Amino acid sequence: MPGVMLMRYRKRKYFLAGRINLIQRSKIRELFEKASKMENVISLGIGEPDFNTPDVIVEVAKKALDEGYTHYTPNAGIPEVREAISEYYREFYKTDVPSNNIIVTAGAYEATYLAFESLLEKGDDVIIPDPAFVSYVEDAKIAEAGIIRIPLREENGFQIDPDELVDLITKRTRMIVINYPNNPTGAVLSKETVKAIADIAEDYNIYILSDEPYEHFLYDGARHYPMIKYAPDNTVLANSFSKTFAMTGWRLGFAIAPEQIIKDMIKLHAYVIGNVTSFVQVAAITALRDERSWEAVHQMRKTYNERRKLVLKYLKDMPHMDAFEPKGAFYIFARIDPELDMSSEDFANWLLEKAGVVVIPGTAFGKAGEGYVRISYATSRERLIDAMERIRRALSEI
């Protein structure tokens, strides 16, 4: 009898928590998997710098290992790292951020997750732009919060309309998500709009989750205005070393928020990962304080700007496509000619099969992304030229 019972048990199906079924798999990853099975494909889909981490940062991490930085650290991060982040905001933005208002996280991904889980619960609503980076909606689902999408329109520079924002706010509204410089559009937020959103958050007593990892990739005189400067008591700012210093694989980010919110985020963080890798944190200090790391950032920005201009020039002369001219990040949100009668997803799949080029359908970022594809220029000039020529030839044959 025990053997029979054991056999029946082994045949039983796995029963997973219902919340896991709420999360949708990223369309970006689905397209990458399809492309991985094909030969001679150029990807313009990846949201990752193609540069290596600056040598000065790498060398410090190696030295830290040799010096024994292989142990646990305080949950919130090594104090000197938090102080270096505080110094950075004082120097770059003339904004006072006490180190007790900072937590070091496993990338901006964890910072945003902690914010959603710490501030939202069932019955709360969060306003999320559309289109927007894919993780926000999924984080909201895990927090069991209601999701309200606010459309971003090209005619408004893909900026949030403050009047439209006010119209969406109800008694249930707990938070609004901001992401500028923006992924996927490359848009930046004007100072006037930043101030308007800050005032709305204060007037209606709601939080702003401001995700700002592309802050140093700005072009044509554009400027970045960190939300923490204008609504410090209402803002949770998420940021990352991944894009600025080409440190995506290091999984290093941070959040800034009022001290009590940080304390609550630390409690959850302590049970999720405990602390960010010790020698990685040591490298963060050098990334922020060493002139050589910033020289590398300036060079990356210059190179990205050259690539941005190259892709925009190609798209200007290309049939059946046009583009919003981005002032930030390293993406171009390109319009598909409606006469092609193809959805964004159909167009991306067609381009992969016809030209061997990966672009991301706008609908991967929300319904308002229909009619667009995201092109990343975080790849070499040679590959960009090859990809643009392939796209031009494919579209010329239609």
Image (cartoon, rainbow, N blue to C red):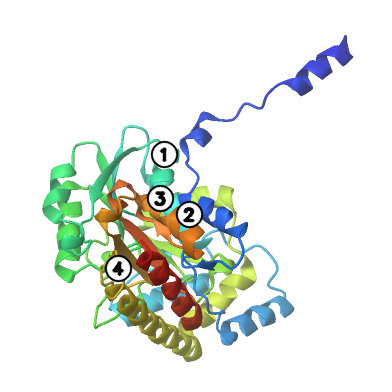
Secondary structure under the numbered disc 3 in the rendered image = helix
Query: Going from the N terminus, do you reach mark 1 or mark 3 first?
Result: 1
Query: Going from the N terminus, do you reach mark 4 or mark 3 first?
Result: 4
Instruction: Count residues near mark 2 (Cα–Cα under 10 Å), then give few for <14, some for 14-19, many for 20+.
Output: some
Cα separation between marks 2 and 3: 14 Å
Cα separation between marks 4 and 3: 17 Å
Q: Position of residue 300 (x, y in %)?
A: 44, 83
Kind of residue sitting beneath label 3:
Asp
Q: Which residue is mark 3?
A: 346
Q: Residue at x 24, y 41 (%)?
A: 173
In the visual, does 374 lie left or right of 382? left
Nearer to us: label 1 or label 4: 4
Cα separation between marks 1 and 4: 40 Å
Cα separation between marks 1 and 2: 19 Å
Q: Which residue is mark 1?
A: 141
Q: Residue at x 40, y 66 (%)?
A: 375
Compared to residue 39, the image places residue 310 above or below, namely: below
In the visual, does 235 lie left or right of 247? left
Name the one closer to the observer, 331 or 311. 311
Q: Residue at x 49, y 69 (%)?
A: 48
The answer to whether one can see residue 316 in this image is yes
Instruction: Count residues near mark 3 (Cα–Cα under 10 Å), then give few for <14, some for 14-19, many for 20+.
Output: few
Kind of residue sitting beneath label 4:
Pro
- Given contact means CB atoms under 8 Å apart, are the residues at marks 2 and 4 in contact? no
Secondary structure under the numbered disc 2 in the rendered image = helix
Query: Going from the N terminus, do you reach mark 1 or mark 4 first?
Result: 1
Q: Which mark is residue 28?
A: 2
